[in-house]
Amino acid sequence: MNKHERMAAALRGQPVDRTPVWFMRQAGRYLPEYMEIRSKVSFLELCGDPDLACEVTLQPLRRFKLDAAIVFSDILPVVEAIGREVTFEKGHGPRLPNPVRCAADAAELVRPDVADALHIVPKTLDLFRKLEPNTPILGFAGAPFTLLCYLVEGGGSKSWKHTKQLLLSDPKTAHMILGMLADTVGDYLQLQMDHGVAAVQIFDTWAGILTPEDYKTWALPYAQRALARASGVPKLYFTRDSAPFLKLLPTTGADVIGLDWRVDIGEARKVLGDMPVQGNLDPISLYGPNEEITRRVHNIMRAAGPTGHTFNLGHGVQPDTPITGVHAMIEAVHSFRSTED
Ligand code: CP3
């Protein structure tokens, strides 16, 4: 099977010659060649330049035997597109100088024409497909609830207090913003599909901070609405801390569920029925000895079973991850069949 066939089959639960592998944040700071580019341009400049974004997307493919790429960008350009500036300060992650905390703030937001406001990623995709036609590329977007978290909080948070306060005190405004985000995200996923992605993934990174009741009110319906707006290739839904919501995830409308490392992938598959899955090695495992990485990778593959599994980390790779650990993980995915025979 070539990489396109292998990824297409795994994402649809069909037989594969071996489990495909890619990983979240595979382009990024753990690679010296990425840091070399970052010494000359800021993260936002990198995200705003299709040539550089394409180069960075290609970097991990040169080092590792990966079955897919993910387009280099971020989830926050959508936040900028609906009307709020985002900055990145060294060591602090994203910051919004002007967060959205009330109805009057929300009234300033705009529903963008995505082809106009989010034109960098489609250009990056076109370039990538010209330079690397043999590797499938995934598109992505933040899920509406996770984007709301940044929009309201103004940056990362431990408690997401402002976001939860808005849900409690002004649900009407929160629903209005989420609806706008869902439609924008759906259109953005479709735009990426129209530029040849093999699959799309929505990241609902922070949905796991919600109670089960709140998840059903604030995260699930808007993930459904975003996913329902786009069609053509398999759609993946990733969230952290999803163990309490597993049985709800087949209702997202996604075709594949991305799992973090806190669940046993075999147990999760029983709950998810016949849905294909992606995951779920703890990214910190990559700091361990090669034999331990191999053991953990093989355990996951054994538990996940031979079909309907795309190997990935349970969340993004950490910036100072040893490259030897990444090699060990990928080698272990490739060697699985032979060790089991
Ligand atoms: O996975 C990939 O290789 C594709 C690129 C990608 C990035 N961000 C690049 C990035 C993707 C898919 C994302 C998604 C993203 N961005 C999410 C959802 C996934 C997740 O990690 O939970 C979130 C929550 C963001 C928001 C964001 N962007 C944060 C919180 C940060 C700072 C934290 C950190 O890891 O430093 C970023 C910055 C960011 N996005 C970097 C990269 C490579 C580091 C920027 C740098 O070079 O300094």
Image (tube, rainbow, N blue to C red):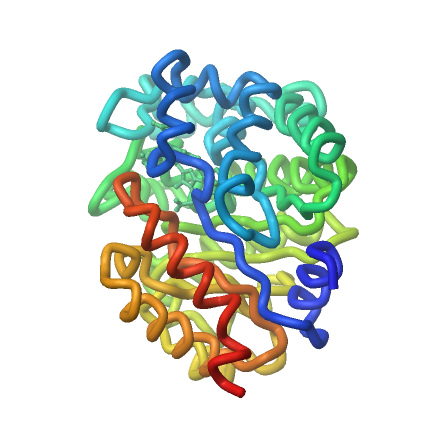
Q: Nearer the viewer, residue 279 or 332?
A: 332
Q: Is residue 328 visible?
A: yes
- The image quadrant where one finds ligand 1 is top left
Residue 125 in the image: x percent, y percent?
68, 32
Q: Residue 4 at what x, y percent from top left?
A: 73, 55
The structure residue drawn at horizontal position 62% and vertical position 77%, both measured from the top left corner, is 307
Left/right of residue 53 with respect to residue 45 in the rendered view? right
**128 and 246: which one is in front?**
128
User: For residue 44, what is the image quadrant?
Assistant: top left
Number of labels in the image equals 0
| Residue 123 vertical position relative to residue 266 in the rendered view, above or below | above
Relative image position of residue 206 (x, y in whole percent): 36, 50
- Choose top left, top right, bottom left or bottom right for residue 90: top left
Q: Which of 39/217 is in front?
A: 39
Q: Is the C terminus in the top left, top right, bottom left or bottom right quadrant?
A: bottom right
- Residue 251 sits in quarter: bottom right
